[in-house]
Amino acid sequence: MDKKLHVFYAGPCLLPQEVYDQTCEAIKDFKGTGVSVLSISHRTKEWEAVMEETRQLWKELLSIPDGYEVVFLGGGASLQFLYVAMNFLEHKAAYVDSGTWAHKALKEAQGLGEAYAIASSKEKNYTYYPKGFDIPSDLDYLHITTNNTIYGTELREDIDSPVPLIADMSSDIMTRPVDVSKYAMIYGGSQKNVGPAGVAFAIIRKDALGKVSRYIPTMLDYRVHIEKGSMFNTPPVINIYIMNRTLNWVKEMGGIKAIQKRTEDKAKLLYGEIDENPLFKGVAEKDSRSFMNVTFVMNEGYENLADDFLAFSKERGIVGIKGHRSVGGFRASIYNACSLEDVQALTEAMHDFAKLKK
Ligand SMILES: *Cc1c(COP(=O)(O)O)cnc(C)c1O
């Protein structure tokens, strides 16, 4: 492949080139042991060091306060939907229905007890983030999904909640400083910003656990995973290794503040082009726009040019911008490894396409 590609897939996402290289190396020879990271025992001191460093990187990069623990679990974010309900739902929980993933999380909770949507933007095909609702004080927890990967909306702030707040941050974790102390738990799949698919992270306030009376199966009990350092059973070793390299990259980039700046620069550039270019328009309402997944469509009168634009941009090495089937149009996912130059390639393509067609 000699053409430089600009990859905008929504997940699994682009990871930094050095993460790919370091992973290849570790698959051949893990830390000079002569054994592949795929084949070495997870009980060796070399592997234990990776686990510990990965936990520390999370704590350091997000300034996670004392009293919280970070665990890594197989099964992706979707299994965390069930974990959350298992470990926290006793009487009643509320969910903000801000998109498909939020809806799926709610459904898992409803399988175990009483859970309901406290606010929803479904009636407008999730084009905005629901805000301004009252949170009753008798809930076990309030669940939010901070970034709605499919629709391109985001809640880019830490809200106050009178009840334990649990957030699915699958697709915007590690892109801004988060006030972790406002949450009982933050979790997500790794494949949007912090690694490969298949491993989920969970940042849990330890004293929020142990409040339910149900039997919790061993593998679904956060307390077990905290106590065993995410090694109750064999952890998803290679996924955690790649997460470790990705977090090291975040640190080398200058940490979360530097990433935040990079994120804002990219989003601003792309939304700027969408708003100025007569051929395109954004999907999400402006004050709900995601800094991660930028959804846009052809403007009125140009609808028939969508396939043309896909072909035009593909010629320039732009891949992964076809919109999700439930939204249509385009979606450019500009996660951490995506550079400003990648976004520039896209805005230039939009600009040049408009010159050609107008
Ligand atoms: C991708 C995604 C999920 C699902 O993650 P899996 O690891 O595929 O289960 C859940 N929530 C959000 C916000 C996502 O973006």
Image (cartoon, rainbow, N blue to C red):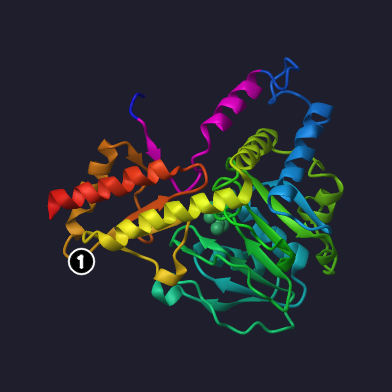
Residue depicted at x 30% and y 63%: 275
Quadrant position of residue 52: top right
Foreground residue among 277 and 230: 277
Relative to 141, 311 lies left or right:
left
Q: Is residue 92 above or below residue 250?
A: below
Q: Is residue 350 left or right of residue 78?
A: left
Q: Quadrant of ligand 1?
A: bottom right
Residue 37 at what x, y percent from top left? 70, 25
- Please identify the quadrant where the C terminus is shown: bottom left
Q: Is residue 5 magenta?
A: yes
Q: Work out which residue is located at the far top of the displayed protein and give it.
A: 34
- Identify the residue at horizontal 36%, vertical 31% (top origin): 4
Q: How many other residues sit within 10 Å of disc 1, few (<14), some (14-19) or many (≥20)? A: few
Q: Answer whether residue 13 is magenta in the image.
A: yes
Q: Which residue lies at the image location 82% right of the left edge and 64% below the top edge?
A: 209
The residue type indicated by label 1 comes to: Glu
Q: Is mark 1 within 8 Å of ligand 1?
A: no
The picture quadrant where one finds residue 177 is bottom right
**So how many labels did they put on this image?**
1
Image: 74 above or below 140: above
Q: What residue is shown with label 1?
A: 300
Image: magenta residue range: 4-28
Q: Image quadrant of residue 24? A: top right
Residue 87 coordinates in the image, percent (x, y): 77, 63
Asked whether residue 325 is in view, the answer is no
Q: Position of residue 79 (x, y in %)?
A: 65, 54
